[in-house]
Image (cartoon, helix red, strand yellow):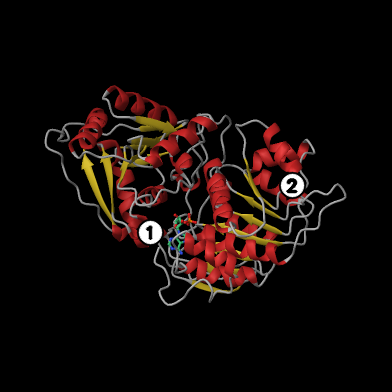
Amino acid sequence: MSPNSNMNFTDLGLVEPLVRAVHEHGYDTPTPIQAQAIPTILSGADLMGGAQTGTGKTAGFTLPMLQRLMAQPAVRDAKGRLPIRALILTPTRELAAQVEESVRVYGKYSKLSSMVMFGGVGMQPQIDKLRRGVDILVATPGRLLDHHQQRTLDLSHVEIFVLDEADRMLDMGFIHDIKKVLAIIPAKKQSLLFSATFSDEIKALADRLLNQPVLIEVARRNSTAELVAQKVHPVPRERKKELLAHLIKSGDWHQVLVFTRMKHGANRLTDYLNDQRISAMAIHGNKSQTARTKALADFKRGELQVLVATDIAARGIDIDQLPHVVNFELPNVPEDYVHRIGRTGRAGATGEAISLVCVDEDIFLRDIEKLIKRSIPREVVPGFEPDPNERAEPIVLGRMTIGVGGTRRNSGGGGGGGRGASPRNGGGGGGSGVRRAGGGGSASSGRASPAAPRSTGGGYGGGGRGRSGR
Ligand code: AMP
């Protein structure tokens, strides 16, 4: 993220209480998405934002949203309750919690109240809080709809609606929930949609949701990846765990974020590391919310050495200047590699992204290098040399098998083009892979028709390929 050096938040039209809160939080210069999104949203226009986590997009929509709400005091209902005037939908609980925290941080000098709502925790405290009244609600779709069904939530006064990380929402199979939410909020409202990619599905959703949106795109985070030192350690399949423990111990690493493809792999690795006296915890969708929140908090405080995460669970984790990210297994969707390594080297800090790669994963590595348009240096760690006689074995992801002898073979059916359309695992029921089209490119904006938002293209997105939630 490179801030716009000759502009400040006041220039963007923000009022003093918001600028003060932003300054106190340590930011003086808006990032490119903020420089474009803030005046647009203040003007009342709908917006389609091509930006992912790490670009500063949260402040980009939170600040002008707060200002618009501050400008018009809420009208209490007949029972004297505050109506919900802004609704922000996010795909994951972690992201919901972080967005709501930003609302509180930036809205510190406003009188606006906010609340985060997600599943996996009791309904009653949420009902109690809703009764007391909130201006801004940040929610994941499932729990929001539960409340709606139980009539503990009134969304009929929503004036501003934000769909954050829309592509992830679709990947995670939330499209029906999103449609249900759209049906229960007022038709007349300001709508903002953020997505890292603009697939046909996203465009269809934008078409339905947005009214003459302004399209804003900022470079995807791979353009900042220069700050991240990337390295591949080739290693025999069965020795990855040992190598990881060796790297952590010999490098005296603390705060290491480790990615695995699947939940059970995350659990097994965590057990192994703990046996090696390396403190580690896993976060993924099967963990309770309390366990996930605790693991993340301990990790942020530096009390937990290793956090093992799957891609979906890691979405939206906002930890600045993470020194080490390790791909214990390479992702089968190359874009996920970019998301993962974006966890390090954020906000101008340098970081190291290391991938432990066995012979089975050569095909994933090739795809990643094609995507990022560079080859990642290989470095064999003495004592962990790959066995030249080791043969590639297929990688089984749920019902799908990938990568036999350097090819992708989808044994699970479906998967247009035969690329990486993995079924969802663990969540019950196979999610349909959605095709994603590349977006990105450098900053641009302009009025766009919702059906065909103007895009500068570029970037590295590549053609659509199947993918799924994990
Ligand atoms: P986001 O893309 O919203 O997840 O933000 C990514 C990170 O950038 C978060 O840690 C923010 O606190 C931080 N951030 C947001 N705005 C700025 C800014 N103007 N300057 C520096 N960092 C920022």
Front in this rendered view, residue 129 or 308: 129
Q: Is residue 258 visible?
A: yes
The image's mark for residue 347 is 1
Residue type beneath disc 1? Ala
Q: Residue 232, how many percent across, how many down?
A: 24, 45
Q: Residue 459, how many percent across, how many down?
A: 42, 64
In this rendering, the answer to whether 151 lies above or below 228 is: above
Tag 1 secondary structure: helix
Q: Which residue lies furthest to the left in this view?
A: 382
The residue located at (39%, 66%) in the rendering is 2
The quarter of the image holding the N terminus is: bottom left
Q: Residue 295, how many percent across, how many down?
A: 44, 34
The residue located at (61%, 32%) in the rendering is 121
Sooner in the amino-acid sequence: mark 1 or mark 2: 2
Residue tagged 2: 133
Front in this rendered view, residue 340 or 152: 152
The residue located at (32%, 40%) in the rendering is 256
Tag 2 secondary structure: loop
